[in-house]
Image (cartoon, rainbow, N blue to C red):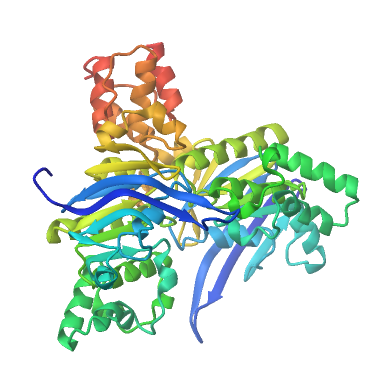
Amino acid sequence: MTNVAPVIKVENLTHVYSPGTPFQVVSLDGISLEIMKGELFALVGSAGSGKTTLVQHFNGIIAPAKGKVWVCGVDVSDKNKRRDLWRKVGLVFQRPEQQLFEETVFDDVAFGPRNMGLGKDEVLGRVKEALQVVGLKIDEIGTISPFRLSGGMRRRVAIAGVLALRPDVLVLDEPAAGLDPRGRRQLMDHVENFRYERGVTVVLVTHSMEEVALRADRVAVLHKGRLAMGGTPREVFNRVVELRALGLDVPAPAGLMHKLRAAGRRVRTDVLTIDEAREEIAMILGEGS
Amino acid sequence: MAAGSIELINVTKEYATGRSHKKCALDNITLTINQGEFVGLVGMNGSGKSTLARLINGLILPTAGKVFVNGIDTADRKSIIEIRRHVGMVFQNPDNQIVSPIVEEDVAFGPENLGCYADEVKERIDWALQATGMDELRHHAPYLLSGGQKQKVAIAAALSMRPDYLILDEPTSMLDPGGKYDLIENLKMLNEKYGITVMLISHHMEDVVHADRLIVLDQGQIYLEGTPREVFSSENFFSAGFKPPGIVQLVSNLRKRGHMIDENIITVQQMVEYICRL
């Protein structure tokens, strides 16, 4: 990831909700970070740490009050250019299925491309492709109402609506919350495939440390609006004590290794996966069969 | 129909999904939950978990079959208030069930509506807030609390009704790891110390490893049932698209490699203790 220009650059960003009132809340407090082209960048932090506020700056929903944000080299405080941001940065909100509104799945996914003023064939092509990316077929569900689909399918249709904009950056705010384990895995697999095929940058806001361990290139930890930690998942999850103090946790394999180390066993603590943990424990146990 | 239990007998629930379409959410389920148990309920989206929860406190009635709470038929609408006193419900999103601008008022809502005297209301609030660890925040506004704290307010409000049963429908799905851990510990304590029966619905297997019994629903039927360890080690559990908690995967992984590690291990703590005993 070196020698690549950042797709998103945040410098000393501060955001205060209801400033000057008794309800004033400092949501972001001097955040600086860079997100590189093509990477999967995870944002974690306990409830109220500022994750959602931060990503809402990326596509112009919130303008920076103090500090700077550049997206694809463009300063987002430039009002004229901010209008183009929604084409570059696709933001999938929490519970995006609540935003479905059209009568058919096709129309809902086509809403964005049509607003971009694209021709009929182009719109059709994009809708077809976007649905395919999330594992849905236009012939099967294009003409039915999105409200007749299951929760997991509705979620995928809503995400397809953002993919159809062909954004350079895809921001997903808790995309898998409330989905069952199978739906969660499938959705994240679709996102990863899309990323590899398109070279899209993905920003993932999540509470699932396992997902970060398995899928993220880098992770930033927010706490009370400040950047508390940053690095690769391996680096960050090796700092168990600090993470727990911030109301977070580490994936089970890492937690296990840290406890074993505390109990005096000589094991690596920077493990992320079950396979890595297995190798370490196999060493303690001696070669089995 | 013994007192001190929830019984579902041949329960089927169908929903109309169109003029002539019906969807069968629960298909001929028979199930008993005994007072004092901690039951985990898992299943994919659409497997019937929430329908089951709603049938138990009479929010909905079965299409066929019977549901009894402490021997009272939920179809007997005259007794519905009594059933709701026995069964407290907590939903996924606490914002949907918090009604008051101050924590202790929200917790008082239930007992006040029961017509309790002021002393009794106060006693119930004190207990419910103390049992959920929310005592210090009793004068705060719920909407300024974190998701985990709000979820505890919702639990305290349910507890103030002094229920025998507490049913929680995916209470952890919107919580951060710390909030989730706190909530599960709190439920374990309520179950062990106060004997409150807990039925916890979740998509996260780590949430239910401490349950006495785990029930897996699939397409409206009971697909698997047993202790968490029994369920996690079942081949059928895997083939239905579930994955056991990481530690259970690690244990079976090690066993496949020929390390005869204790297969009863289901938590990180148990694993650490096991290895340190070697």
Q: Is residue B208 visible?
A: no
Q: Is residue B13 visible?
A: yes
Quadrant (top left/top right/bottom left/bottom right) for the C terminus of chain B: top left
Compared across the picture, whether A165 is left or right of B47 comes to left
Q: Residue A50, how many percent across, how many down? A: 42, 50
* Residue found at x 19% / y 63%: A168
Q: Residue B221, how many percent across, how many down? A: 50, 58
* Residue found at x 51% / y 70%: B24
Report the front residue among A280 and A202. A202
Q: Residue B159, how many percent across, how many down? A: 72, 47
In the rendered view, would you say A181 is above or below A117?
A: above
Q: Quadrant of residue B75?
A: bottom right
* Residue found at x 69% / y 60%: B99
In the rendered view, would you say A167 is above or below B217?
A: below
Report the front residue among B56 and A113. A113
Q: Quadrant of residue A242?
A: top left
Q: Residue B120, how many percent across, how many down? A: 87, 46
Compared across the picture, whether B85 is left or right of A2 comes to right
Q: Exactly how many numbered labels are in the figure?
A: 0
